[in-house]
Image: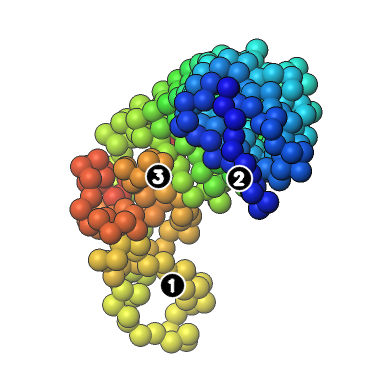
Amino acid sequence: MARFPSVDDKCAVLHLSRLHLDDLNLDHLADSKRKQIQQLHLTYNRLTLLPTSVCFLSNLEYLDISNNALTVIPDDIMRLKNLKTFVAKNNLLNECSFPKDFDCIRVETLNLSGNRFEDIPAQFLKMTTLQSLSLGGNRLKAIPEEIQNLTSLEMLYLGGNLISSIPPEVAKLTCLRYLVLCDNRIQSVPPQLNKLHSLLSLSLHNNLLTFLPREILSLVHLQELSLRGNPLVVRFIKDMTYDPPSLMELAGRTVKSQNLPFRSCDLPANLIYYLNLASECPNPKCAGVYFDSCVRHIKFVDFCGKYRLPLMHYLCSPQCSSPCSSNPQSDAESEEENSVPADRLQRVLLG
């Protein structure tokens, strides 16, 4: 049983990772010293149980016990009334591993990715203070309707499971900013997700999607949308055709791109208004403009940053190559990006 050395008066964070610990005894610490500890890192050890002494750190706010061999979380964890962040990635935990009243702890961040969960525990679905829930890399087959109870949730990470559908109740998570459902078996996206007005990032790559609902276009704050590795992407890339601009838009592009002079008395008011709607092509190598009033600044990306395709950066013509990203290497686009004609980018979303 390991005994932690003396703690100085200013200690608030204990790093006890990679010490081959199979237990931990903090009984030798004075109560005043224990109260100073706010963060505890016990990652990459040999723990099969959460040491009892940890549960007597009354002011502990952050606990990381990832990469151990834990199978159960003891009832004593309920003593940690100030715990805000609990991380236990890559252990052997499942839906039966937690105390029945675990929801009474006002945890804000819960990360249990890489365990053996087949269902989301009922206790978790009552944690109304939860802001971030990560259960990636488990064995989940479904998202329960009760997920709607997590009204404070801002980030939901369920990538790498066996989930086949998204319940419309997810749309009631009005605070949700990041939704990660990649690497599952999802076949469709409910149109109700257009109610997620705070959503900034939606990750759906490597699923079984064949179409997206048109309603997803109303997610005007969405900045990142990842769809790579779906039948949707393959089908749309092959079938899309270019829809040429109208004669009025072609005339407007000529006026704006060549800076042709005109006075307010030369043109009707509606045409002057139309010309003022011109937007510059996002390609830095192009001086063209366009008049698409439905431009959305949504990026079609993979979170790992390897694959970037600007979905809503609508270009002025099919011949205009995409800037693709702010990455310094964007001029050397990947094969996947070069294979997608620029004129098809905006319409990939439309199912």
* Amino acid type, callout 2: Val
| Residue at mark 3 | 300
Q: Identify the residue at horizontal 35%, vertical 75% (top origin).
A: 256
Which label sits in the foreground, 3 or 2? 2
Relative to 176, is 334 on the left or the right?
A: left
Are dots 1 and 2 in contact, CB under 8 Å? no
| Residue at mark 1 | 275
Q: Identify the residue at horizontal 56%, vertical 51% (top origin).
A: 221
Q: Is residue 152 visible?
A: no
Q: Nearer the viewer, residue 228 or 268?
A: 228
Q: Position of residue 8 (x, y in %)?
A: 64, 49
Q: What element does badge 2 sit on?
A: strand
Q: What element does badge 3 sit on?
A: strand
Q: What element does badge 1 sit on?
A: helix
Query: Residue 344 shows which numbered tag?
Result: none
Q: CA distance from mark 3 to mark 2?
A: 39 Å
Q: CA distance from mark 1 to mark 2?
A: 60 Å
| Residue at mark 2 | 13
Looking at the rendering, which quadrant does residue 210 occupy? top left
